[in-house]
Amino acid sequence: MEDYAYVLDYLPDGRPSDRGYKHEPLVLALGEDEFKLFELIPKKNSSIIVGDRVYIGKDLDKREKIRHVKRRIGWEELTHAAQSEVPYVIDNIIDNKEKKFIEFFNIARPITKRLHMLQLLPGVGKKKMEATISEKRKEPFKDFEDLKERVPVLHKPKKLLKERILNELKDPDIKYKIWVAE
């Protein structure tokens, strides 16, 4: 279960395609830890701003802006505005949780005899994977700067992570998921 989510879009009158006369406000959001996509129902008179980090966990007393989680949604159910906001939110999450993401490079392991977790990152082939593994054996990576310095062939590791997360969000049938929860 996600405890926090980032607002991707706010629809004060709900979706135009919603049936019926009663349209309730709707928030489209991305979960902070498992990158789940949600429709949220805000509390009345809440000030909702795109990019806000909102509490959606089980402790109802901590919920300042969100009344409840309506449902999980897929990429195709996001508005175009929400889809365009996702890369910025992912950047923000990676920056705020650098330790979690650098740990991926430290603990990545083979998935099969021919495929390694590192190779799931866009643009990472056998050479980049081997260079990364060789360096992590010497000493675990401390942060992205350390990773970039010790494995220069691995350009922009944050960008690789972001692209992988986006691929997992956009394709629900992707075979191996690293970041987006089922």
Image (cartoon, rainbow, N blue to C red):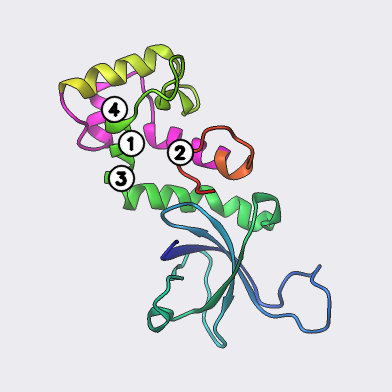
Left or right: residue 179 compared with residue 106:
right
| Disc number for residue 178 | 2
Residue matched to label 4: 148
Q: Nearer the viewer, residue 64 or 145?
A: 64
Q: Position of residue 168 (x, y in %)?
A: 56, 40
Calculate the distance from the C-alpha at mark 1 to the C-alpha at mark 3: 7 Å
Sort mark 1 into few (<14), some (14-19) or many (20+) by Cα contacts within 10 Å.
some
Residue lying at 69% horizontally and 58% vertically, measured from the top left: 79
Q: Magenta region's main secondary structure?
A: helix
- Which label's residue is closer to the chain start, 3 or 2? 3
- Which label's residue is closer to the chain start, 1 or 4? 1
Disc 4 residue type (three-letter): Lys
Task: Kindly give the residue lying farthest to the right in the view shown.
Answer: 20
Disc 3 residue type (three-letter): Lys
Calculate the distance from the C-alpha at mark 4 to the C-alpha at mark 2: 21 Å
Calculate the distance from the C-alpha at mark 1 to the C-alpha at mark 2: 9 Å
Per the rendered image, the range of residues in magenta is 139-167
